[in-house]
Image: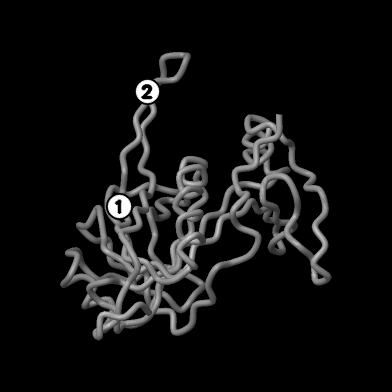
């Protein structure tokens, strides 16, 4: 059975300029990814970092990175208020030299001529997950572009998530965003704890992002952006 998780998006819904930094759900520790219970920001602007720490709690520190975002703030916030400018979800296979291919779960993204080819990924969700884990098939990539509702003047932010739960949960949210005309939306972006027991009796828990739209954003004159 074909399972198309990403029928809504064919291309990004926003192009973001003047980026202040990146919102992250975890970090690397001893070379291994570690999930955090609160949000983590990275930026290259010390003034922005200081404002984040004042607003959301936490301390400003440096971290090793090849990007210009060499400052981080591991906040005390599990939920933040944002203005969503764009949402984009797809399936991507990455290689050592970058992106190998990108699809929506059933067909590859349009080429320069607008032609869509059948995707090489398996159709069944379980097979998709197995191939993604093995590094031979596409895995989910969810991107959210936004400004901070309480710090709109510092610039735009981005969040990238690769979780299967987020990939599924974001679909009705993205559909609502598209239905609303892709205009900026007030929203909350929270950390949600997921807990379950596997068939073999193993207890599993992890944090997943939870995006909730709250209506069209307005400017100081009360008009939609």
Of marks 1 and 2, which one's residue comes earlier in the chain? 1
Above or below: residue 76 compared with residue 193: below
Q: Is residue 212 left or right of residue 183?
A: left
Above or below: residue 165 compared with residue 111: above
| Identity of the residue furthest to the top in this view | 200
Tell me what residue is drawn at x 43 percent, y 68 percent.
64
Indicate the quadrant where residue 61 lies: bottom left
What residue did someone put label 2 on?
A: 203
The one of 185 and 80 positioned closer to us in this rendering: 185
- Local secondary structure at mark 1: strand
Tell me what residue is drawn at x 72 percent, y 35 percent.
123
Neighbourhood count class around disc 2 (C-alpha, 10 Å): few under 14, some 14–19, many 20 upward: few
The one of 79 and 104 positioned closer to us in this rendering: 104
x and y, in percent, of residue 209 in the image: 38, 49
- Quadrant where the N terminus sits is top right
x and y, in percent, of residue 106 in the image: 72, 45
Neighbourhood count class around disc 1 (C-alpha, 10 Å): few under 14, some 14–19, many 20 upward: some
x and y, in percent, of residue 218 in the image: 30, 76
What residue did someone put label 1 on?
A: 190
Q: Is residue 166 left or right of residue 220?
A: right
Q: Is residue 160 left or right of residue 74?
A: right
Tell me what residue is drawn at x 46 percent, y 46 percent.
166
Judge depth for marks 1 and 2 and give the one in front. Answer: 1
x and y, in percent, of residue 128 in the image: 66, 37
Distance between the alpha carbons at the discs numbered 1 and 2: 23 Å
Q: Is residue 182 left or right of residue 110?
A: left
Indicate the quadrant where residue 194 lies: top left
Above or below: residue 201 compared with residue 170: above
Tell me what residue is drawn at x 37 percent, y 23 percent.
203
State if disc 2 and disc 1 touch (CB < 8 Å).
no
């Amino acid at each position: 059975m074909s399972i198309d998780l990403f029928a809504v998006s064919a291309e990004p819904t926003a192009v973001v300029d003047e980026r202040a930094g990146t919102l992250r759900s975890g970090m690397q520790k001893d070379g291994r990814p570690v999930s955090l219970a609160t949000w983590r920001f990275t930026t290259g602007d010390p003034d922005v970092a200081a404002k984040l720490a004042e607003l959301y709690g936490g301390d400003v520190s440096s971290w090793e990175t090849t990007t210009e975002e060499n400052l981080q703030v591991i906040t005390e916030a599990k939920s933040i208020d944002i203005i969503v400018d764009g949402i984009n979800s797809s399936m991507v296979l990455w290689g050592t030299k970058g992106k190998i291919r990108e699809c929506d779960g059933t067909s590859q993204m349009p080429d320069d001529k607008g032609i869509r080819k059948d995707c090489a990924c398996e159709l069944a969700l379980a097979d998709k997950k197995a191939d993604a884990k093995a590094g031979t098939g596409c895995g989910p990539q969810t991107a959210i572009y936004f400004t901070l509702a309480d710090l709109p003047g510092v610039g735009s932010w981005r969040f990238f998530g690769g979780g299967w739960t987020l990939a599924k949960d974001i679909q009705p949210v993205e559909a609502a965003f598209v239905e609303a005309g892709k205009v900026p939306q007030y929203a909350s972006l929270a950390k949600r704890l997921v807990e379950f027991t596997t068939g073999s009796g193993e207890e599993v828990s992890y944090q997943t992002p939870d995006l909730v739209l709250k209506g069209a954003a307005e400017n100081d004159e009360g008009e939609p952006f």
